[in-house]
């Protein structure tokens, strides 16, 4: 409670954090943006509805919302229909320019960015920029697996299916190789023998195009005619509709529960947008002002998917302490997963296991901790070690 170190071992060596790194983004966002902050997506046009018609294009202006869904676009279409809209003379345009640069972190792996957990981050996102593709196993080991379809239509994509049939107990071995605004998605790996409908999450390669396509479909399903294409690139000033995200505290609770990289990166990038400087710089400066200066920190993204991210266990534990003492400390602690005296965020990838958060010992005193293991080959041994460490903290 006084901020003194109880135990430290290799605590000043920087480790790869995996998803426990997310707490650096979420704790910062709560203090800078506030728990009630909301992302806003807006629908604009050049002119209002007149005699059932909108002259020109509809433009969706993204506000970086990671939670915008196809159902939200369907609700927009229903609202426009109720207001008497029957035809749009132009097409659907999108504006995702709020977040600049690539959809992906510079150090995200090629094997990550086509899969659902590595979906791109844009100023305009829809359905977490993900789709589900369904496979059926072949009749024998090594035989081709077939694609049954996707849950949503992905426009302009050709599927290169090299997926084969693996052993019955092999599980989901599919790896999706995509890329930024690519027209070819490569499907490789295996599905288990006997699988009739194996569902695999993939990343949409063109979030803006995907959103425009899905909104066009929603309008047409509502009985609203839409022109074949955009008829102007001029700015549009008339606001038709707005959609706001859930409050930030709800998004952060979702991040801590599901370890969603996409949601975290949207929050991370918004920190940079609001301050008009790199997000990592915003985070460093904020905590330095709060008395925590990171040593050995390398922050290539806000979610920990990049293996080039490094942080010292001491700093990760100290972050929990300072955030817990901060203006939204109770909200931050409450957003973490909890079990048997622990509140924590876990990180895991190949050769990496990390834990960070709070432990309430049998004495009733609360301790902040970070436990990080890198470069191992025996996962069972790490699991056993982590259990012993956590049990020891709970016994304090």
Image (cartoon, grey):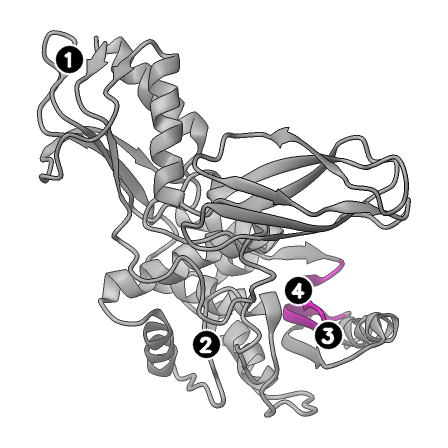
The span from disc 3 to disc 4 (Cα, nearest Å) is 14 Å
Residue behind mark 3: 351
Secondary structure category for the residue under label 3: loop
Mark 2 highlights which residue? 299
**Are circles 3 and 1 on residues that touch, CB within 8 Å?**
no
Q: Which residue is mark 1?
A: 53
Q: Residues within 10 Å of mark 2 (few under 14, many from 20)?
A: many
Disc 1 is placed on an element classified as: strand
Labels 4, 2: front one = 2
Mark 4 and mark 2: Cα distance apart in space: 18 Å
Q: What are the residue bounds of the magenta stretch?
A: 340-361
Q: Secondary structure at mark 2?
A: loop
Q: Nearer the viewer, mark 1 or mark 2?
A: 1
- Of residues 120 and 282, the one nearer the viewer is 120
| Residue 277 percent coordinates (x, y) | 25, 71
First in sequence, mark 1 or 2: give its number: 1
The chief SS type of the magenta part is strand
Kindly identify which residue carries mark 4: 346
Q: Is residue 205 left or right of residue 110?
A: left
Q: Quadrant of the N terminus?
A: bottom right
Residue in view at x 68 percent, y 66 percent: 348
| Label 4 to label 1: alpha-carbon separation | 52 Å
Q: Residues within 10 Å of mark 4 (few under 14, many from 20)?
A: many
Residue 193: x and y, percent? 87, 40
């Amino acid at each position: 409670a006084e901020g003194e170190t109880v135990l430290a071992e290799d605590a000043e060596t920087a480790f790869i954090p995996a998803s426990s790194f997310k707490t650096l983004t979420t704790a910062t966002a709560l203090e800078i943006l506030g728990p009630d902050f909301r992302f806003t997506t807006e629908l604009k046009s050049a002119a209002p509805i007149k005699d059932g018609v909108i002259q020109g294009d509809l433009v969706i202006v993204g506000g970086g919302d990671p939670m915008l869904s196809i159902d939200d676009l369907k609700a927009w279409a229903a609202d426009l229909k109720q207001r008497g809209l029957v035809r749009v003379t132009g097409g659907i345009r999108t504006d995702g320019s709020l977040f600049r640069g690539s959809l992906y972190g510079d150090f995200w792996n090629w094997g990550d960015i086509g899969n659902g957990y590595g979906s791109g981050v844009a100023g305009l996102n829809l359905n977490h920029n993900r789709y589900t593709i369904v496979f059926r196993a072949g009749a024998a080991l090594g035989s081709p697996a077939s694609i049954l379809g996707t849950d949503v239509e992905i426009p302009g994509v050709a599927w290169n299916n090299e997926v084969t049939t693996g052993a019955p107990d092999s599980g989901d071995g599919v790896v999706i190789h995509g890329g930024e605004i690519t027209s070819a998605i490569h499907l490789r790996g295996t599905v288990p023998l006997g699988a009739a409908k194996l569902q695999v999450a993939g990343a949409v390669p063109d979030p803006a195009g995907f959103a425009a396509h899905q909104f066009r479909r929603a309008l047409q399903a509502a009985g609203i005619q839409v022109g074949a294409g955009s008829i102007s690139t001029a700015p549009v000033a008339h606001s038709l509709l707005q959609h706001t995200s859930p409050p930030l505290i709800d998004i952060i609770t979702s991040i801590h529960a599901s370890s969603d990289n996409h949601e975290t990166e949207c929050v991370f990038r918004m920190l940079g947008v609001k301050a008009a400087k790199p997000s990592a710089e915003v985070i460093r400066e904020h905590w330095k002002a709060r008395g925590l200066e990171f040593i050995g920190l390398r922050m290539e993204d806000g979610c920990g998917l990049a293996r080039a991210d490094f942080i010292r266990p001491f700093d990760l534990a100290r972050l929990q302490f300072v955030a817990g003492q901060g203006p939204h400390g109770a909200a931050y602690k409450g957003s973490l997963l909890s079990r048997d005296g622990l509140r924590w965020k876990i990180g895991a990838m190949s050769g990496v296991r990390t834990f960070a958060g709070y432990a309430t010992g049998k004495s009733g005193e609360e301790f902040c901790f970070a436990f990080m293991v890198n470069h191992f080959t025996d996962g069972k041994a790490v699991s056993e070690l982590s259990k012993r460490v956590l049990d020891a903290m709970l016994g304090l």
